[in-house]
Amino acid sequence: MDDGCGSTVAEAVHQCMVDWKVPFERVPACNFDTTTANSGHNTGAIVHLQHLMNKPLLWLGCRHHSAEVILTHVFTALEIEDPKSPDVSLFIRFRNAFPSLSRRPRSLNFAFTKAPFLITKEFDLLIRLKELRSADFARDDYLEFLELSIIFLERNRQFSSEYEFLTCGALHKARWMAKVIYSLKIILYKREMERLDINIFEDDEQYGKLVRFVMFVLHFYVEHWFKSPLAANAPKTDLTLVKEAIHYKKYDPVVSEAAVHACHLQGWYLSQELVPLSLFDDSLSAQEKGAIATKLMRYVPSNRLPDRSGRSFGKPLFQTVSYSTELVDLIGSDSAFFFSSLKIDPAFLEKPPADWKNDPSFIQSAEKVRTLPVVNDAAERAVSTATEFLSSARNEDRYQNNLQVVETNRKELPSMRAKKSKISSWCDSSVLTS
């Protein structure tokens, strides 16, 4: 998308804010897909929007979109398919063969050689995924991804035929879960396809590459994905993913290099401006929070604008992470902008972390952080809904009425926001396994 596109989007958003009488001073941040059209240094929509508002914003890149970028880098690096092809022919062949396969296969393919540290990690991960399933947090594609991951991690036990595999869905890029769901199913159905003399692989090498991709999905990606909606957990989760990807180099250098490179390209929550989110992460120890608070007190309070790349009000600066990096190492002078932007009183930093939960300024600040949107699934669903129902109306009034009916119906369903507390407790038990 060109510069005109970015400015057009920014002007449309700005005009909506004016029409809805939204005070600019009440808008501290912007949540967005991390495409160049939105996040470009000079021509992105967010840069234009900041200039129209005449103020810098906190850049809250969609963590699900960032995770998809990381996944795509790994998939491409493994050369499972021709990267120039618009479709994944392997997935298409499997979808075409699926009607011939049993929804409850007799046997599943579980024979893999794993790195020792992954075997140790699997046990704890399986427990957390089952807790997440019992909390009824995931639905639709997310639930299918969760179920398939649990089946894989239970592969040393006898498979229960009670689970019925769903029909293969769409493959378009807007369906975030397509790559992982198709890959998991293909590997699981390997023995079933052999039994029926169905071959969808170009050669054994392609199957081996897909196995390596699935290993990355199971041991790194699934946990990261389901933690993504929590703003406070974002810095620790992203840092953990980078460290695990670096550690994985001794077992699969190609996957490791691709994942680390992509993580650095999507380092929104490891920037100096957003690392202070970790102060509100319940899974972080008091010692870690104390070290971060001590370093932050060098820089806050401060009203200075952060240093950024590109134009003034430009893009936040990303930081390079190594295996020895800790969250406190990522704190710097730009971290003060986090407090001034969200109008957070830093007084609680002077107290021991054990006393923060009783401090009024911390309680108020934690509530602000809890409501920060760090994924834009709702926006994706809104666009999808608008597209689906566009053809059902002959005029604008009828179209808007249809959308309101759909929205009202969905509001009656269980709130995803209410379930954040359930996934939050699940995240608290997470530790880096090395």
Image (cartoon, rainbow, N blue to C red):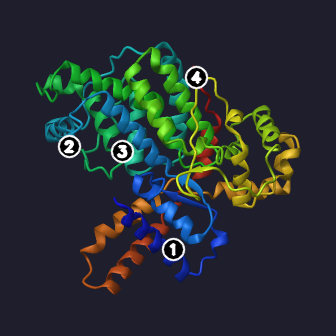
Residue type of the residue flagged with mark 2: Asp
CB-based contact (under 8 Å), mark 4 and mark 3: no
CB-based contact (under 8 Å), mark 2 and mark 3: no
Q: For the point 52% across and 83% down, which residue is it?
A: 19
Which residue position holds label 4? Answer: 433
Q: Nearer the viewer, mark 1 or mark 3?
A: 1
Query: 248 or 155, which is in the foreground?
Result: 248
Q: For the point 79% across and 54% down, which residue is it?
A: 302
Name which of mark 2 and mark 3 comes first in the sequence. Answer: 2
Label at residue 14:
1
Q: Nearer the viewer, mark 2 or mark 4?
A: 2
Q: Kindly report the distance in space between the C-alpha atoms of the residues bearing marks 2 and 1.
A: 36 Å
Q: Kindly report the distance in space between the C-alpha atoms of the residues bearing marks 4 and 1.
A: 45 Å
Where is the N terminus found, in terms of image quarters? bottom left
Residue type of the residue flagged with mark 3: Met
Query: 428 or 157, which is in the foreground?
Result: 428
Q: Is residue 87 above or below residue 288?
A: below
Residue type of the residue flagged with mark 1: His
Label at residue 177:
3
Q: Residue furthest front?
A: 311
Image spot of residue 36 (x, y percent): 41, 52
Could one spot residue 154 in this view of the protein?
no
Image spot of residue 223 (x, y percent): 50, 36
Q: Is residue 176 above or below residue 209?
A: below
415 sits left or right of 292 in the view: left
Where is the C terminus found, in terms of image quarters? top right
Name which of mark 4 and mark 3 comes first in the sequence. Answer: 3
Which residue position holds label 2? Answer: 87
> What is the crowding at mark 4: few (fewer than 14 residues within 10 Å), some, or many (at least 20)?
some
